[in-house]
Image: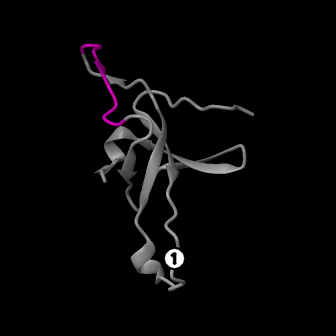
Amino acid sequence: MAKRLIPSLNRILVEKIVPPSVTDAGILLPEKISKLNSGKVVAVGPGARDRDGKLIPVSVKEGDSVLLPDYGGTTVKLADKEYHLYRDDDILGTLHD
């Protein structure tokens, strides 16, 4: 089994962030409110090439928090953890504190 997956071309490996369903005070949060489709970038590919052969780098870097589409991506299981592969074009945006 591979210890580290390096995505090819303009693909991004993301670990989805699962928000807590209960607050620190013990209040149960409804599923709709607590569901934000976001994740942390674990690995990125080198980028794609344009028609002239120039490298177009990926727009995010490892460690970024990103907003993901509701559907799409490819599920990958590595070392009992579940990750998702997306193309750079599929990422909706980056999240900043």
Q: Residue at x 34, y 31 (%)?
A: 58
- Residue interval drawn in magenta: 52-60
How far across and down, in percent of the image, does residue 6 sit? 54, 29
How far across and down, in percent of the image, does residue 90 sit? 35, 47
Residue placed furthest toward the top = 53
- Give the total number of marks visible in the rendering: 1
Q: Residue at x 52, y 85 (%)?
A: 28
Q: Which residue is mark 1?
A: 24
Q: In terms of secondary structure, where does tag 1 sit?
A: loop
Amino acid type, residue under disc 1 in the picture:
Asp
Q: Residue at x 49, y 67 (%)?
A: 19
Residue 60 lies left or right of residue 45; in this view the side is left
Decide: few, some or many residues near mark 1? Use Cα within 10 Å; few <14, some 14-19, many ≥20: few
Quadrant of the image containing the C terminus: bottom left
Q: Could you say which is closer to the camera, residue 72 or residue 30?
A: 30
Q: Residue at x 72, y 43 (%)?
A: 79
How far across and down, in percent of the image, does residue 72 sit? 44, 54
Residue 85 lies left or right of residue 77; in this view the side is left
Position of 21 relative to 77 (above/below): below
Q: Is residue 79 visible?
A: yes
